[in-house]
Amino acid sequence: MLAMNYRGPYRVRVTQKPHPEILHPQDAIVRVTRSCICGSDLHLYHGLVPDTRVGMTFGHEFVGIIEEIGPDVTKVKVGDQVLVPFNVACGECVFCKQQLYGNCHESNPQATAVGGIFGYSHTAGGYDGGQAEYVRVPYANVGPTVIPAEMDPDDAVLLTDVVPTGYQAAEMGGIQPGDTVVIFGAGPVGIMAAKSAWLFGAGRVIVIDHVEYRLEFVRNYAQCEAYNFESLEDPVLFIKKTTDWLGADVCIDAVGSDAAGSAMQTLTGRKLLLQAGSATALHWAINAVKKGGIVSIVGVYGPTDNLVPIGNVVNKGITIRANQTSVKRLLPRLIEHVQAGRLNPKEIITHRVPLEEVAEAYHIFSAKLDDCIKTVLIPSPAKL
Ligand SMILES: NC(=O)c1ccc[n+]([C@@H]2O[C@H](COP(=O)([O-])OP(=O)(O)OC[C@H]3O[C@@H](n4cnc5c(N)ncnc54)[C@H](O)[C@@H]3O)[C@@H](O)[C@H]2O)c1
Ligand SMILES: [Zn+2]
Ligand SMILES: [Zn+2]
């Protein structure tokens, strides 16, 4: 089969790989009809995630058709059209039982660090992902969810990560009616966090980024304010000024380790790899939130340390909430929001690319070219 194949930082291509097989009675094989490239894939692509092995297939956002099932799979059957949450979760461990599917204790040999994630390096279990024609889906009674008949698969594929992650970012912010919510990052996740913030009752939503076309997009799509940090003297000062010098009620980091905006953080975090990526957006979030406010982090950082202003967290009495998203927990509510038209995920898709052109697609998404917000990869047999 054809699959995306990681060859080293900034180098990916499509190659033939062996067709995946059922390795466990609870496995399913899914024929992929759509997969996406995510900002999380960019951290891998940029070489920021340890133990990203050459030969690995990325892709944790995918939908497809169940092609084959192991003898213990009862919740889905061959021929079902499914969306597959990005978390690989057993459904039975102490964390899964609390619906913390992003923190499953069984699906990753390094379970104390993070739960299993499709296509996300050996630090997250080493599972090959869905940027391929086929993918093996473990614990197939847990993750795969039949796509409602009337739902567009383009909406469904965004329910595997981006929509729940933006939504959980807002949820973790504990937004109270009328709150001012500042979101760092106008990528797909930040865009969905902005949209979700309104659903939680925010009174004012501000997005910060430095890519003009994304700021323009989020202004229209999420009906919020959006500012370019390069044209602000200091984004933290700006937020303080515009909130009567109190700071935002809630700040959301939807950027993670690839953050721009500080030469020191970029040098130590992205060039010299002395810390787990650049923590610039996180700095700004901590410094721009009000005393007693909440910082919600969904931006991804590596397992090693980051330089963050922990003293300010203590002195300001900030609550920090962060996690990998528990996609399955949120799916019923989010499917409802999509069906009711309150969320229109597919409108963020700007690029539809044959899987064969994955290298160019990564380059365009990474370099923020061609007004790219979200890219969907389509394997050629699945062309619709
Ligand atoms: N926790 C989870 O479960 C989860 C799930 C999905 C994605 N993520 C993470 O969420 C983050 C965003 O994902 P995405 O797909 O939107 O990525 P993306 O790369 O498309 O978007 C990130 C945006 O941040 C902007 N940016 C860079 N530096 C900034 C700064 N200092 N301040 C404000 N904006 C800045 C970039 O210009 C870009 O538009 C990534 O770190 C990704 O790994 C986490
Ligand atoms: Zn993702
Ligand atoms: Zn589990």
Image (cartoon, rainbow, N blue to C red):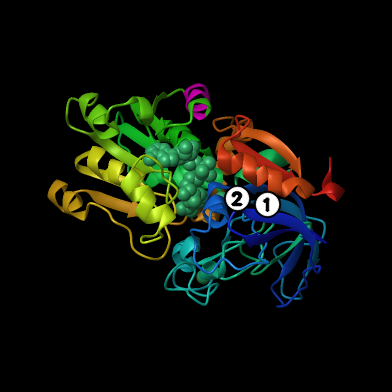
Q: Can residue 244 be seen in this view?
A: yes
x then y, percent, for residue 376: 69, 42
- In the rendered image, the vertical position of residue 112 relative to residue 355, given as above or below: below
Number of other residues with Cα within 10 Å of mark 1, as a class: few under 14, some 14 to 19, many 20 or more: many
Question: 41 and 77: which one is in front?
Answer: 41
Magenta extent: 214-222
Quadrant in the picture for residue 145: bottom right
Q: Which residue is drawn at 33% across and 42% down?
A: 262
Q: Quadrant of residue 310?
A: bottom left
SS under mark 1: strand
Q: Which amino acid does label 1 sit on?
A: Phe
The dot on residue 62 is: 1
Decide which of 376, 12 is in the foreground and name it. Answer: 12
Q: Do the residues labelled 1 and 2 touch (CB within 8 Å)?
A: yes
Query: Is ligand 2 less than 8 Å from the beta carbon at label 2?
Result: yes
For the residue carrying disc 2, how many other residues have a C-alpha within 10 Å: few (<14), some (14-19), or many (20+)? many
Real-space CA distance between mark 1 and mark 2, rounded to the nearest whole angstrom: 7 Å
Provide the secondary structure element on which disc 2 rests. Answer: loop
Specify the amino acid type for callout 2: Thr
Look at the image and tell me in which quarter the N terminus lies.
bottom right
Query: What residue is at 37 percent from the left and 29 percent from the top?
Result: 230
The circle on residue 298 is none
Quarter the C terminus occupies? top right
Residue labelled with disc 2: 160
Place of residue 279 in the rendered image (x, y in percent of width and height, measured from the top left): 35, 50
Image x and y of residue 252, in percent: 36, 42
User: Magenta span has 188?
Assistant: no
